Amino acid sequence: MITPAAEALFDAMDATWPAHRVMPCDGWLIRDGSGGGKRVSAASAVADSPDIDAAIAAMRAIGQTPLFMLRDGGGALDAALAARGFDLLDPSLIYLAPASTLAQKPPHVSLFPVWPPLAIMRDIWAEGGIGPARLQVMPRACQPLTGFAARHDDRAAGAGFCAVAGPIAMLHAIEIVPGQRRRGVAENMLRGAAHWAREHGADWLALAVTEANAPARALYEKLGMQVAARYHYRQGIEGGEE
C-alpha cells in the first residue's frame, strides 16, 4: 500500500471539505468560502509564478479579505507575501495513518454514524465555534460521508464529520464536549471513524490540526498517526488599503 503524497492529501482535503465554488485565476485557485472558514476561503497556487495582485483583486471582488494557503513551507511565494505585509496564520499539519491500524468497532452505544446531523450534534458544534456556515460545507463533500455522534456515560460527548475521497478518508470538525474530554471520547471517535472508513473503501485516515493544538497532536501521535503534510496561511491588509 503506497503512502499518499502531500498533493493527494490536499486534494482529499478539498474534496471532503469543499469551498462553495472554486475559480481559476492567473495561476491560482480562488475559493469562495461563503463564511465557512479559512480552509474553504483561501487561495492556493497552481503555477510556479502566480500573479499575487490578480489573486488579491479576485478575492476582494467576491467580498473576501485576501487570504492565501501556503503548502509545505511556501518557499519564494511565502516570502513574497510576507514582504507585502501578509501575516502568518495557523501553521497546520495533516496527520495520516493506515485505517487498518486505527480501526476498531466502537463499544456499544458509544459512537453512531449519523447523516444528516442530529440537533445535539449541531449544538455541540455550535458550542465549539462551528456554526451554520461551516455546517453548510458538509453536504457539499464527496460521497460517502457521515457525521459521528459520540456518547459517554449515557450523555452526548462529541461530534465529528468524515468523508471519503478515493483511498483517503478525512475526519473534520472534531468537537468534544468540555466535560467529556480526557475520557477516551476522541480516541474512540478516531478509531470508529477508521472503522467506518474501511467499510467504505478507504485505506487511510487523515485529519488536519494546528501546530498549536498540543493535546490533539499528542493523541494522534499516541495512536500512531504521522505528519504527512504541512501548510499555513498568509492574511493581511495589503498596502493598508482596507
Image (cartoon, rainbow, N blue to C red):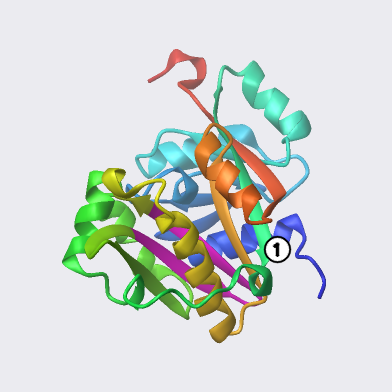
Q: Locate residue 201, reporting x and y percent.
A: 60, 84
Q: Which residue is disc 1 drawn over?
A: 8
Q: State the residue in front, 13 or 202.
A: 202
Residue depicted at 40% across the width and 41% down the height: 61
Q: Is residue 184 left or right of residue 199?
A: left
Check disc 1: other Cα within 10 Å, few if <14, some if 14-19, many if 20+. some
Q: Locate residue 232, reporting x and y percent.
A: 60, 36
Asked if the magenta segment contains residue 188, the reply would be: no
Residue 40 to residue 103: above or below: above
The span picked out in magenta is: 159-174
Q: Quadrant of residue 212?
A: top right
Residue depicted at 39% across the width and 69% down the height: 140
In the picture as drawn, the residue positioned furthest to the front comes out as 153
| Magenta stretch: dominant secondary structure | strand
Q: Locate residue 183, reporting x and y percent.
A: 39, 51
Q: Is residue 6 left or right of residue 129?
A: right
Q: Is residue 93 left or right of residue 110?
A: right
In the picture as drawn, the residue positioned furthest to the top comes out as 240
Asked if the magenta segment contains residue 164, the reply would be: yes
Residue depicted at 58% across the width and 32% down the height: 53
Secondary structure under tag 1 reads helix
Q: Locate residue 85, reporting x and y percent.
A: 57, 17
Q: State the residue in front, 154 or 124.
A: 154
Identify which amino acid the numbered label 1 is placed on. Ala
Q: State the residue in front, 72 or 62.
A: 72
- Please tell me how many numbered marks the rendered image carries: 1
Residue depicted at 22% across the width and 59% down the height: 122
